[in-house]
Amino acid sequence: MKKPLLFLAALAFACAASAQQYKWVDKDGKVRYGDVPPPGVKATPLRAPAGPATPPPTSAAKGAKDKGGKAAAPSGPLTPAQQEADFRKRQVDAEKAREKEANVAEEARARQENCQNAQAHLRQVESGQRIARVDAKGERSFLEDDQRGAEAARARKSVGEWCK
C-alpha cells in the first residue's frame, strides 16, 4: 500500500515542479512566488515550463543539401559507425597526402641530381678536353670541333631545363 501512495505523491510533485512559476508583490510589499498568482496582482512569469524533447530529424532533413549541393552536416552527435567511417576517411586522406609529399620530394631530388650531372657535362665540354663517344659497334671516336660546339649547345640546353 505504501508503494502506490509514494508513487502518486512523486507524480504529483513532478507535475507541480514542471508548472509555470510566477513572481509578484503582495499588498504588504513582500515578494511572493508561486504557480498561481492571486487575482488583481501584476505577476511576472519566471521561466517557461520545459517543453517536450525535440523530435528526431525527418527524412526530408536527412537528405537536406546546402547551397553548394553538398549534403548538409548532421546536427547531432555522430553514431559509432559514422565516427569509424570519418576516421577511416581521414586515414586514407593522410596516406594520400604522405604519398604526394614523397613523390614531390623524389622529383625534387631527381631534378637536383640531373642538374648537377648536366652542369658537370657542360664543364667537361667547355674545358677543352677531348671527349670520346662509343658508337653502336663499340668503337671509340673523339668529337671534332664542330661536334664539340653542338654538344656544348645541347649541354647548355640541358642545364637550362634541369636547373630552373
Image (spheres, rainbow, N blue to C red):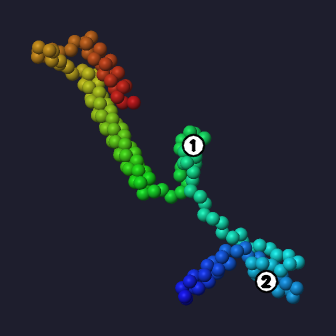
Residue 132 horizontal/vertical position (percent):
17, 19
* Residue that label 2 marks: 32
Q: Position of residue 150 (x, y in %)?
A: 29, 14
As measured in the structure, the alpha-carbon distance from the residue carrying label 2 to the one carrying label 1 is: 51 Å
User: In the shown orientation, is residue 48 left or right of residue 151?
Assistant: right
SS for callout 1: loop
Q: Residue at x 20, y 19 (%)?
A: 131
Give coordinates of residue 157: x percent, y percent: 35, 21
Would you place residue 45 above or below residue 31 in this image? above
Tally of numbered tags:
2
Pick the front one: 14 or 96:
14
Residue farthest left in this picture? 138
Compared to 115, does 12 lie above or below? below
Q: In this view of the protein, which residue sits in the foreground, 106 or 8?
A: 8
Point out the tag, 2 or 1, that comes first from the N-terminus: 2
Residue drawn at 55 percent across, 88 percent down: 2
Q: Secondary structure at mark 2?
A: strand
Residue type at the position of mark 1: Lys
Report if the CB atoms under discs 2 and 1 are less than 8 Å apart: no
Q: Quadrant of residue 48?
A: bottom right
Q: Quadrant of the N terminus?
A: bottom right
Give the quarter of the figure containing the C terminus.
top left
Instruction: Tell me if residue 121 can be seen.
Output: yes
| Nearest the eye: 123 or 73 | 73
Query: Which residue is denoted by mark 1 in the rendering?
Result: 65
Please state if 20 lies on the left or on the right of 98 as rendered: right
